[in-house]
Image: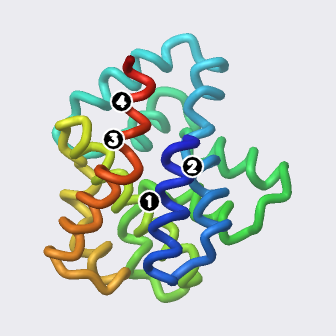
C-alpha cells in the first residue's frame, strides 16, 4: 500500500489530473479492506487464491458471493470513518469497476483516481511478470480518461518500474 500510494502520488503529479495528496490517500486505503477481510473471514485466503486463478478479474464479485461484502466496500467504510474525503471514499469503493470511468455522473477526480490506480496496477503486475486482468478489461478506458496513447502508457509503466517500483521491490526481497 505504501509503494502503491507513492507511485500514485508521482503519477498524479505528472498528469496534473488529481491532487497528489488525494492519490496518496487513495493508494494507502484502496486495498486496506483485504487484511480486514482476512481477519474477519476464516476462508478469505481461499477466496483470494480462487480469484487469482480467474481468467478475468472477478475478485469483488467472488468476495460478494462468498462473504456478502467485498474489500472495496470495507476499505471505503474505514476511509469514511477516518474522515477521508468523500471523492477518495467513492474511488476506493469503485476502484474495481472500470466502467465508472465512462460515467459522467461520477466526479472527474474519482474517475482520475481510479484510472491512475489501474495504470499503477498495470505497472506493478508487469514488474511481477504477471498480467493485469483489470487492465485487459479497462485499459482503453484508462487511456481515454487520462488522455494517453499506448506509447505513453508503456513509457509511464517503464518509468514507474525503473524509478519507483524496482528499487523498492529489490530492497524488500533481499
Locate residue 52, reporting x and y percent. Answer: 28, 30
Are dots 3 and 4 in contact, CB under 8 Å? Answer: yes
Residue 53's disc is none
Closer mark to the observer between disc 1 and disc 4: 4
Residue bearing the label numbered 1: 117
Q: Quadrant of the N terminus?
A: top right
* First along the sequence among labels 2 and 3: 2
Cα distance in 3D space between marks 2 and 4: 23 Å
Q: Label 2 to label 3, Cα distance in Å?
A: 21 Å
Label 3, residues with CA under 10 Å away: few <14, some 14-19, many ≥20: some
Check the image and report above or below for 45 versus 123. Answer: above
Select label 2 or label 3 by which is in front. 3
Dot 4 falls on a residue whose secondary structure is helix
At 68% from the left and 61% from the top, the residue drawn is 89
* Residue 132 placement (x, y as % from top left): 24, 48
Question: Which residue, given by chain and number where applicable, does mark 4 sit on?
Answer: 170
146 left or right, relative to 5: left
Secondary structure beneath label 3:
helix
Q: State how the image is colored.
A: rainbow
Which residue is label 2 attached to?
30
- Tag shown at residue 166: 3
Instruction: Locate residue 5, reporting x and y percent.
Output: 56, 52
Q: Determine the image quadrant of residue 126.
A: top left
The residues tagged by marks 3 and 1 sit, at their Cα atoms, a distance apart of 18 Å
Label 4 packing within 10 angstroms: few (<14), some (14-19), many (20+): few
- Above-or-below relation of 84 to 161: below
Write the residue at 21% across / 68% down. 155
Q: Are marks 2 and 1 in contact (CB under 8 Å)?
A: yes
Mark 3–mark 4 distance (CA, rounded to whole Å): 6 Å
Residue 131 occupies quadrant: top left
Q: Earlier in the sequence, mark 2 or mark 1?
A: 2
Amino acid at each position: 500500500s505504501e509503494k502503491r500510494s507513492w507511485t500514485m502520488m508521482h503519477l498524479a503529479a505528472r498528469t496534473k489530473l488529481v491532487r497528489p495528496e488525494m492519490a496518496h490517500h487513495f493508494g494507502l486505503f484502496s486495498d486496506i479492506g483485504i487484511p480486514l477481510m482476512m481477519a474477519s473471514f476464516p476462508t478469505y485466503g481461499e477466496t483470494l487464491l480462487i480469484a487469482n486463478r480467474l481468467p478475468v478479474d472477478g475478485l469483488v464479485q467472488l468476495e460478494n458471493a462468498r462473504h456478502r461484502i467485498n474489500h472495496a466496500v470495507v476499505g471505503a467504510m474505514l476511509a469514511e470513518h477516518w474522515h477521508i474525503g468523500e471523492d477518495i471514499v467513492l474511488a476506493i469503493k469503485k476502484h474495481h469497476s472500470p466502467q465508472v470511468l465512462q460515467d459522467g455522473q461520477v466526479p472527474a477526480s474519482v474517475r482520475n483516481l481510479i484510472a491512475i490506480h489501474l495504470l499503477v496496477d498495470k505497472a506493478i503486475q508487469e514488474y511481477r511478470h504477471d498480467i493485469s486482468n483489470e487492465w485487459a478489461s479497462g485499459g482503453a478506458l484508462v487511456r481515454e480518461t487520462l488522455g494517453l496513447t499506448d506509447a505513453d502508457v508503456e513509457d509511464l509503466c517503464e518509468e514507474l518500474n525503473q524509478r519507483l517500483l524496482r528499487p523498492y521491490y529489490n530492497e524488500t526481497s533481499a
